[in-house]
């Protein structure tokens, strides 16, 4: 058995058949626990209570498309926006992040007990698409363009750094984080050295990097 506790409360047939006492878990096997009463030292076997589980409907967003799947979870487990978990189905094995939680009556909440959840809305975060708005170096917004780069979810972007993707080369000016990225204390970062990982970013703002900007050193 996995995650077997060192001690459990359970009645002792020798000294306390009607009330629970603390027992030390000696061994686990065959679906039963061998325990020793801390009050009288009596050793006996107990059958642990099975953990009740619920099946959750999961909608996964993946590069503009979506598919549905099912996962099981303990009924008293809390599901929260921003949680990440590994989704394994016959078709896919990927890490997803909870973006929204739907209850009965199409109500959306930030967190809920698994037993109350109707649908968990998620997006894949193993590999992600990041939208980048690239401005000309002269600061004009009229000729700005939008591109999409595809990177691993943990790829790091840093304000002030120069990135190159194919024919596109740009210097990062700022980035905006997603609402489901809980590790950040504000929505927008624009100070040199600020960093964010791709799976957390809603959009990156940058300036075209011209060849003349490079120096020999």
Image (cartoon, rainbow, N blue to C red):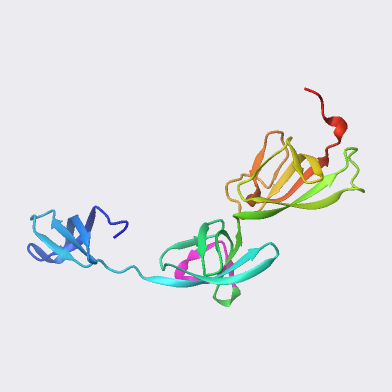
As for residue 17 lying within the magenta part, the answer is no
Q: Main secondary structure of the magenta part?
A: strand
Start-end of magenta stretch: 107-120
Residue at figure coordinates x 17%, y 60% from the top left? 34
The quadrant of the rendering that contains the N terminus is bottom left
Residue at figure coordinates x 87%, y 48% from the top left? 144
Q: Is residue 45 visible?
A: yes
Q: Quadrant of residue 96?
A: bottom right
As for residue 111 lying within the magenta part, the answer is yes
Q: In which quarter of the image is residue 121?
A: bottom right
The quadrant of the rendering that contains the C terminus is top right
Q: Residue furthest top?
A: 217
Is the residue 49 above or below the residue 21 in the image? below
Image check: 18 left or right of 138?
left
Residue at figure coordinates x 19%, y 57% from the top left? 27
Image check: 20 left or right of 203?
left
Q: Nearest the camera: 90 or 80? A: 90
Percent x, y of residue 64: 70, 64
Is the residue 139 above or below the residue 79 in the image? above
Image check: 128 left or right of 36?
right
Image check: 7 left or right of 191?
left
Percent x, y of residue 153: 62, 51
Q: Is residue 179 visible?
A: no
Q: Residue furthest bottom?
A: 105
């Amino acid at each position: 058995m996995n995650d077997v506790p060192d001690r459990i409360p359970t009645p002792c047939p020798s000294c306390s058949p009607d009330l629970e006492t603390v027992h030390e878990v000696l061994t686990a096997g065959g679906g039963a626990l061998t325990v020793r009463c801390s009050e009288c030292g009596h050793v006996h076997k107990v059958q642990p209570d099975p953990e009740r589980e619920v099946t959750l409907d999961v909608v996964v967003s993946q590069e503009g498309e979506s598919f549905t799947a099912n996962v099981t979870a303990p009924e008293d487990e809390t599901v929260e926006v921003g949680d990440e978990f590994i989704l394994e189905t016959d078709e896919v094995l990927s890490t997803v992040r909870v973006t929204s939680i739907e209850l009965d009556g199409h109500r959306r909440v930030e967190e809920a007990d698994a037993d109350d959840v109707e649908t968990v809305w998620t997006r894949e975060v193993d590999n992600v698409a990041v939208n980048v708005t690239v401005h000309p170096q002269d600061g004009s917004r009229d000729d700005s363009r939008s591109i999409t780069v595809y990177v691993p979810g943990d790829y790091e972007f840093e304000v002030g750094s120069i990135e190159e993707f194919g024919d596109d080369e740009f210097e990062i000016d700022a980035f905006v984080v997603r609402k489901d990225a809980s590790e950040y204390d504000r929505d927008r970062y624009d100070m040199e050295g600020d960093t964010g990982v791709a799976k957390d970013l809603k959009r990156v703002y940058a300036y075209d990097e011209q060849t003349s900007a490079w120096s020999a050193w």
